[in-house]
Amino acid sequence: MFVIAGNRRQQGTRVLDDGLVRARWRTWPRQPSIAHVVMADHTIAPVSTTIRDWIALIAECGHSTIRTGALSTEAAVRFREHGFVEIQRLALLHLGLDGSRVPDPHHRLRPLRGDRAFAAAERIDERAFETEWNLDAAGIREACEATPAHRIRLALTANDEPAGYMITGRNGAAGFVQRLAVDPAHEGQGVATSLILDGLRWLRRHRVDDVLINTRLDNERALVLYRRLGFVDMNETLSVLELDLGDHSEAP
């Protein structure tokens, strides 16, 4: 059994819930054929019967592809059993906030509030990521809700131009860099560093002990930055999986 919150034909976020495992489901920005399913806990996958139910429901709603959020190795196994294949592998890095001082950011930062601010973040995201991975304003707002508490800040240049944004999340004593995007026109100016330092200062104020961040395994520029700021590579990697519903067939 599972329930779905929201109208099936709406384009907004819907919640899938089988009583034990929850996921958010929405249409991928600018690609209506793709359904994006993000688990509430990326380390836990639903049972096989639930996955089959979700696949059937999403196919019924007219999508041709299902794409997951980042999944732990163990959670990914369950989805692979139903035909999902890996399309992206992510490095996972950890930072322990041990009470040492976090330097001040070099850029002026402001909260994102209102449609105009989120539209500016959407433009940055569109330029920072490849087309199949960027988020629109609605997707950015949804990313903010991935944790019980979050902080979203826009970095500005000396001329007040939006240069980048970041979403920092926390869940109890755990902290997460949920989304970080820098306009390519302002790369190499310390924008990402300022945003991360701001997020770490906020997490420290709330007594967060551990911070996680992920990025593509081949994103060497980001990996160098994170390591310079004290993040350490973990042995675990994360996987983003995809299912082509046109090629999908499963015994009842």
Image (spheres, rainbow, N blue to C red):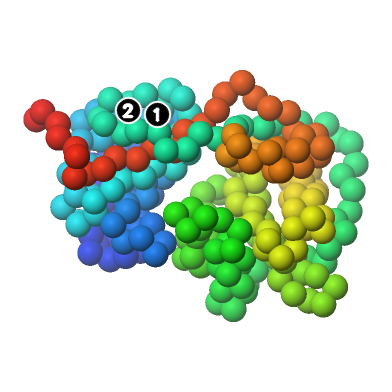
At horizontal 61% and vertical 21% (from top left) the residue drawn is 235
Judge the density around disc 2: few (<14), some (14-19), many (≥20) Cα neighbours within 10 Å.
Answer: some
Q: CA distance from mark 2 to mark 1?
A: 6 Å
* Amino acid type at mark 1: Ala
Secondary structure, mark 1, is helix
106 vs 216, nearest the viewer:
216
Q: Residue 119, position in %: x, y?
A: 56, 74
At horizontal 63% and vertical 41% (from top left) the residue drawn is 219
Give the position of the C terminus as an image quadrant: top left
Q: Can you identify the residue that label 1 sits on?
A: 76
The quadrant where residue 13 appears = bottom left
At horizontal 59% and vertical 78% (from top left) the residue drawn is 116
The number of numbered discs placed on residues in the rendered structure image is 2
Q: Residue 152, position in %: x, y?
A: 65, 60
Give the position of the N terminus as an image quadrant: top left
Q: Can you identify the residue that label 2 sits on?
A: 80
| 89 displayed left or right of 10 | right
Q: Residue 174, position in %: x, y?
A: 65, 37
Q: Are marks 2 and 1 in contact (CB under 8 Å)?
A: yes
The quadrant where residue 218 appears = top right
